[in-house]
Image (spheres, rainbow, N blue to C red):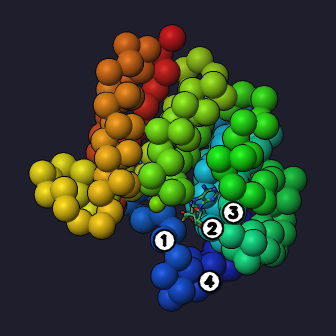
Amino acid sequence: MDEVYLEKIKQKALEEHIPIIMDDTLQIIADILKTNKPKKMLEIGTAVGYSAICFSKYLDKEATIDTIERDEERVKEAITNISKLGLEHKIHIYSGDAVDVLPTLTEKYDAIFIDAAKGKYPFFLKESERLLNKNGIIFADNILYKGYVMSDYNKHKQRTAVRNLREYIKEVTENPNYETKIIEVGDGLAITRKTL
Ligand code: SAH
Ligand code: MG
């Protein structure tokens, strides 16, 4: 892995205010990926490919990542970044809205990273459940959304997102087939294991 180029991708994304995965969040996911060695991973929200590229370092040697992004400019940049690092055979991008793309997917995944529109998290969860292998893991980034999700302040303009994030948390914690941890790292990370 060309770490210098990867660092350039990261710095450019930060300068352009693209919300890439935070270092602490990445660290936690990386540790889990290193132990679980998923063979197939799905990401919802590619942006410029930074997180997918990082994850690819920790997966099984033969592993592949499918990732979905709706912003065409970002898709282009992600394709460039992925090919500069020689990862075209590992990371495949679906260009389109995940709301349309997810229902077309049929193959199962060992790990899923949800990192896109917060108002769609319950929908992303429903699709992820359908696409997740037994013992699979779902990571949901930004689950605490700057603390809004845990506060009782409900009047700000992000309340639809907050309501949907809360619904996501409720569903993963109440489902007896799942084991969920909510971690106060970065913008909040939910880690859900399918035990059945
Ligand atoms: N995972 C990336 C950051 C993703 S930022 C990283 O850590 O490097 C969130 C991205 O999700 C944005 O680029 C946005 O365009 C995309 N997005 C938001 N809603 C989406 C949707 N419904 N379908 C596909 N992409 C979506
Ligand atoms: Mg995020």
Side of 194 relative to 12 (left or right) = left
Q: Earlier in the sequence, mark 4 or mark 3?
A: 4
Q: CA distance from mark 4 to mark 1?
A: 15 Å
What is the quadrant of residue 124 in the picture?
A: top right
Residue receiving disc 1:
19
Residue under label 3, please give it.
Answer: 70
Q: Nearer the viewer, mark 4 or mark 2?
A: 2
Q: Nearer the viewer, residue 34 or 73?
A: 73
Disc 1 beta carbon < 8 A from ligand 1? yes
Give the crowd class for mark 1: few <14, some 14-19, many >=20 residues within 10 Å.
few
- What kind of residue is marked 4? Lys
Where disc 3 sits, the SS reads loop
Q: Which residue is mark 4?
A: 8
Could you tell me which residue is drawn at 38 percent across and 18 percent down? 175
Q: Is mark 2 within 8 Å of ligand 1?
A: yes
Q: Please give the residue where the numbered disc 2 appears in the rendered image.
A: 47
Give the structural element (helix, strand or loop) at label 1. Answer: loop
